[in-house]
Every structure is written in structure tokens, then in C-alpha cells.
Image (spheres, rainbow, N blue to C red):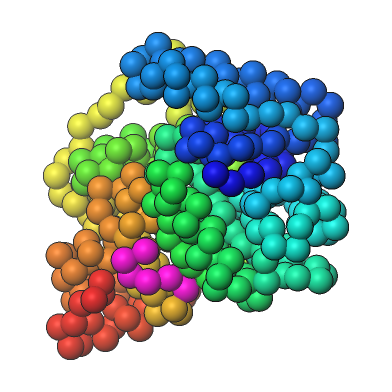
Amino acid sequence: MSVVGVVGAGAMGGGIAQVAAVAGEEVQVCDAQPGAAAAATERIAAQLQREVDKGRMTPDASAAARAGVQAVDGVAELAGSDLVIEAVVESLGVKRDLFKELERACRDDAVLATNTSTLSVTDIADGLEHPERVCGMHFFNPAPLMRLVEVPVGALTSDEVADQVGGWAELWGKTAVRCASTPGFIVNRVARPYYGEAQRILEEGVADCAHIDAAMTAAGFRMGPFALADLIGNDINLASATSVWEQTDEDPRYEPTRAQRDLVARGDLGRKTGRGWYDYAAGAPAPVEVDADLARAVSERVNAMLVNEAAALADRGEATPDDIDTAMRLGTNYPFGPLAYGDVWGAPRVLDVLTALHDRHPTGRYRPAERLVRAAATGGRLHG
């Protein structure tokens, strides 16, 4: 059993605390806002009781997990932790200040992990005396249900610490994938075309939101890109897109669309505001039927961009092909890993789609990854 500290008692922090407690860890939760940590423990207790009511957990296991979580007053009380995970606001300044405080408070051999989804682990650890013990541990929401944990490794993170973080995730019933701490890590980087390319298809007048979504669900995706963006929140989706774009020196592959910017500027953030890409005043939009030729054209374009983005990430050595495909299946519920799908589809066919798009839009957005070009020329594999 390890002692795990969680800093940040919001939905994500509480979810992480629950995961660790169910796995048998001793968990201490703190938050800068008075009463927030105690409220989180109450939410965890209620969620564990629901698991019992649904027959997914025994009363004894629920009671043990509840007993394993306690609220503490501040970071100083995490001094005995083996692992501390921060899940506070996505602000580099806030996180840097917190990690300096954690470094002073915790044992020298304690591992310090960040749940950041958009910020550089290297930047967060900058200025610490021991940046080698700082690593990413990125859970997906809701943490108790989502199986994936990304382990983004900072420039100075030690291999031992990265192994420890991945080991904890696996012990807690998750699948850990390691990656470099580059913009978007794996999932938020590779997923960008699912939204961005769909929005460009919309802007070009090829199809409307409903028919694009229908094309992608027909291709095996659980939700279409517009319905999914409305569920996540268009402000959150735009912030993620903007972060990756800015951190990649405004690479045209990731530039947010005018349609998305306008939508957020109007306050049409999705389900939480009653309107986004769809109007939810009368409930969820009804599904539509889509012509087979249109469905094929839309899904080929979006999928080609997903395959290409995954191939580019593998080219840069930021994650292994296995970890890329695993991350996209588990972190986004995609029906396939994009590299494995590219091999089934055939690299020459993917390259043909991108070449045609580049001929129409020579902006650099559709430039093919070297891995894709090599596979198309040699008959090699993207996943191999």
C-alpha cells in the first residue's frame, strides 16, 4: 500500500482519489478552497455507494475504499506521501508554485506527478531542485471509468520515476502509455483532426454538422465530431486546439477554424449552454441518414488526417506505435488505432487522399508524414 496525496478536489481530483482508494491506497486530498476536500470525500462516498447499489462493488470493498480517503488541510500534511498528484487549474504559474511547495513539503524520494492535459511537464518542473522526480500522470474524465493514463515524460524526468508512475497506474487497473511531453501528448494531439477536419468540411459547404456526424458514426465512431464537441464543451475544445497550435509555432495542421472561434465567441458552448453546433432546446438532435458516397468522402478525409497525425507523432519518436494506437482506442473510444487502421486501409490510399487535399489547399496542413510516404513507397507498415 502506498500513501497518495491528491492536490485539487474538483471532479478530476476526486476521481483520481477514488481510483487510488479503490485500489487499496491510503489517500489524502487537499484543496486551497476551504471545505472543498471534505466535499470531495463525500462525493466519493456517494459514488462508492452507487457502485454497491448497482452490484459492481461489495459493501466491504466500498467501506474499505471510503475509509482509505481523508481530507487534509494543506500541502504540508502530504509530507509522508509516496506519490502526490496535482489536479489543479491549468495555469503554468499556479502549477509551478504548487510544485515548489510540494518539493519543500514532501520527502526527497516522493514522486510528484501532474495531471496536466495541455502544459509541458518540463516547464512545470522548471526551477525545481529535483525536476527528475516530476512526471505527468494524465487521467481522462471520468477517471474512475476511463481506462487510459498517459505518462508524459519531461526532459529531466528520470526513467525510474516514469516507470513508477506507469506502475502505479497499472496497479490501479489502468492502461499506461508513455510519451514525450510535447504539445497535446498523444490523445489531444492525434485527435485534433477529428474536430478540425470536420469543421473544415463544414466551412467548405460539403456537408452540414448532422451529415458529417452521421458519416463518422457510420464509420464506427461512437459520436460524431460536432456532437462530441458539444458534449465536451466548445470552449474546452477550442482551448485545447489553440494550445496545441500555439505550442507548435502555429503549425497549420492545428489552426483552429473560424467557425469554431465564432461559435465560442457567441457563447454557444454546447450542451451546457443549450446551443453549440446543435440547438438543444428541444432535446438531442435527431440522427439523419447520409448518402453512402458522401459518408465515404467525409470519413476518408477525416481518417486520413488521423492516420497522418499518428504517423507524424511516431516519426518524431514521441511515443511507440503500440502506445499511440492504444491511447486513441482507450482515451477517445475510437473503433481502431489510427496506425493499424492505416495499414488495413493501405498507406498509398491514405497518401492519395492527402495529396488531393494538398493540391486543393496548399497551406501545409495536408503535408504527409515521412512515415506515411515511406510506407506508401516501400509497401511497409505504419504500425510496424
Q: Which quadrant would the C terminus be assigned to in this image?
A: bottom left
> Could you say where residue 70 lies in the image, as x and y percent from the top left?
69, 29
Drawn side of residue 356 relative to residue 70, left or right: left
In percent of the image, x 50 and y 52: which residue is there? Answer: 168
Rendered image quadrant of residue 313: bottom left
The answer to which of 35 and 300 lies nearer the viewer is 35
The answer to which of 383 and 212 lies nearer the viewer is 383
In percent of the image, x 38 and y 38: which residue is there? Answer: 209
Q: Per the image, is 316 magenta? A: no
> Compared with residue 36, is residue 103 higher up or lower down, i.e. above or below?
below
> Compared with residue 130, is residue 278 higher up or lower down, i.e. above or below?
above
The answer, for residue 358, to whether it is visible in the render is no
Rendered image quadrant of residue 351: bottom left
> Could you say where residue 204 lies in the image, as x and y percent from the top left?
40, 53
Q: Magenta stretch?
A: 318-323
In percent of the image, x 37 and y 63: which residue is there? Answer: 324
The answer to which of 131 and 206 lies nearer the viewer is 131
Drawn side of residue 48 relative to residue 113, left or right: left
The answer, for residue 56, to whether it is visible in the render is yes
> Could you say where residue 67 lies in the image, as x and y percent from the top left?
60, 24
> Could you say where residue 6 lies in the image, as x and y percent from the top left?
67, 41
Residue placed farthest to the front in the image? 1
The answer to which of 138 and 169 lies nearer the viewer is 169
> Compared with residue 186, is residue 313 higher up or lower down, i.e. above or below?
below
